[in-house]
Image: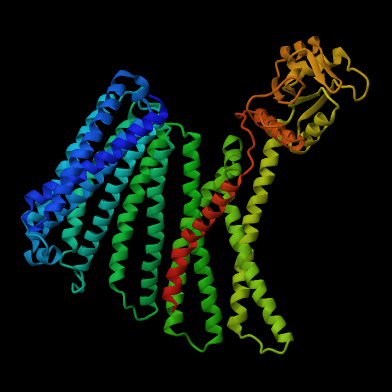
Amino acid sequence: MSTPRRLYVYAVCAVTLQALAHALIGLLRNLIVTGLDPERSAIASQIAIIIIALGIFLPHWLWGLRVARSEVEERESVARRLYLYGMQAALLAPVVNNAFNIAARLLAEVGDGGTAQRLYPRLPAGEFILYHLAGAVVLGLIWYYHQRVVAEESSPATEVDGPATARRLYLLSFSAVGLAMTTIAIVNLLRWILLQIGDAAALSTDGPLTAIARLMVGAPLWIVFWVRAERLFSGPQEEERASALRKFYLFSVVFIAALASVTTASILLASLFRQLLKVADETQGDLRTAIAIIVTMAVLWVYHGLVLREDSRRTDESAGQAGVRRLYTYLVAAIGLGAALLGLGGLLSVLILSLERSGTGSALTRQLAWSAAALIAGLPVWGWPWRGVQLRAHAKGVVGDTERSSLARKAFLYFFLLVATLVILGSAVYLLSQILGMLLGEAGPGLSELGHPIGYGIIAVATWLYHAAALRADRRLGLGALATGLEGKRVVVVDVSDGSLGAAVTEEMKKRTPGVDLGSIQLGAANGQAPAKARVEDQLSKADLIIGPWNVTVGMPAGEGGVVTADFARAVIRSPARKLLIPTRVEGYEWAGVDRWKHEAIVRQVVSAALQILRGEQVKPVRPLGVGAIVGIVVGGLILLQIVLGPLLSLLLFTTR
């Protein structure tokens, strides 16, 4: 089946099956739930949808099923796997919702009939349960059918690459849903238990019942899907253990737990500081809520951290997994550093305002509590991961080279350089405007008006200098490691035209490859003399890398006066050196799929590829950032700025009003 036809078949099946399922659920509910009292036109519409949708769905689905059973290619297609797992997800999500509503209503009826009537005033208990049971049964049966189809078609041959990714996405998505429901339920239950200690007036009667219902549905959902994902990870397929999606799931959970822990720890510490400073605290209940969140998130953090450690012990880390790990590490460090800088700035503000005012007011004391809490909570969250990445960045060998050149590290360092630069800019503009205003006869600014921009500017300068020093250290270590690794390597650059390309490559190699022994061979007519055959063969035989146009391996005219003889081509081929061929243009010959690069672009690509070969890496082309990538990086930076600074800044502003 061709790809367009396949997409058409599964798109029609998806739309018609969803319409059929929901029309069938609506009709069933209207027939068995007397309290709905539907209009006849509604029932007629539902019957019409069932007939039409079934008439369209069945031929398309049976067609696709017949092809899948007869053709291995169809069973292995990404489109079919996306359809099967996508439909399972679309069917299971409302089943989970219906199951939660049934469990919540049953618990409400058992716990307190008055509460149940208040929460569910429209339908009696029996009809309410029938209403949601109808949806759960219909969708559950259709889901089970798709599950059986997947089980019949699944094999190590059919679920690799794209299909395996679709399966992992399905399993980990519902594992995440179940984990989120379970986590929220445990937080609410712990909070309910803690609220029994002390003032119970704030206790909500239906709170624990809703949490228990959420736990009854969420915990089995998480266990079933997570256990299946764990079994696949422990299975024979190496691709499963090399999955970056699994690492993304685990690190996302740890990241969310870290973010919630830092924010909540700030709230908890601030509350404790306010009590020590004898400041009125109108939100005493928040202390117990904070404890419930911290305990739950700590367990979540520790468990998934242990899973990550076990994963690392059982299998080598792939490049994709390493990238996800670095992204997580630097995001956690960014959260901690953002909180610490905000706390430091808040403490500085308190110091300045306390010098200007006589005594300290409650608002100032409250700000002191929040700022100290943010600083104390943020420092360890930044310091622990940052210490680890710094140790890896200063390590020798591939570990250090990979860490220093990673995009996540560069994004982290330049992000805080950007933030510090913007703060310095704002502070400098404000101070200069005040000075100019005084020169023009305006009244001089007060201590706080000058102290805040000066203090924040000092913090920003220190932040800028620290991260700039880290970048310089990375560059120095990178150059040193490069020089050590390339010392004694012999590279021969061959040019068969006018000599300009070879000269440009040689000059750029001298700049970027310290320690390399560079030689050159000119076959063109630029100097009017041909190189000695013995010297040429000696150079080629002792080289570790030969760089030259593609036609150095064949005896043929090279254009622009250059000639590659058969003897020279044989000498190149016999040399044990790696060969890096340049796709130059020769009259009468063309390259398929290769752009006509400018001279500078060719030099850049050649030198980059040479470096990768000398380092023992896989050769990958240098691709300049397009407009879309630049826009994506800018948007991602703004999102990161909001993630790191937004919640804590809002929290501090709220508490200092």
Q: Is residue 602 visible?
A: yes
Quarter that holds the N terminus? top left
Q: Position of residue 290 (x, y in %)?
A: 32, 64
- x 41%, y 31%: residue: 4
- Relative placement, left or right, of 525 versus 162 is right
Residue 405's place in the image compared with 573, above or below, is below
Total marks placed: 0
Q: Position of residue 538 (x, y in %)?
A: 81, 15
Q: Position of residue 16 (x, y in %)?
A: 26, 39
- Relative placement, left or right, of 26 versus 288 is left
Query: Of 367 and 113, which appears nearest the observer?
Result: 113
- x 76%, y 13%: residue: 569
Residue 94's place in the image compared with 569, above or below, is below
Query: Of 42 and 656, which appears nearest the observer?
Result: 42
- Relative placement, left or right, of 100 versus 608 is left
Q: Is residue 161 visible?
A: no
Residue 223, image quadrant: top left
Quarter that holds the C terminus? bottom left
Query: Of 18 and 49, which appears nearest the observer?
Result: 49
Query: Of 462 and 547, which appears nearest the observer?
Result: 547
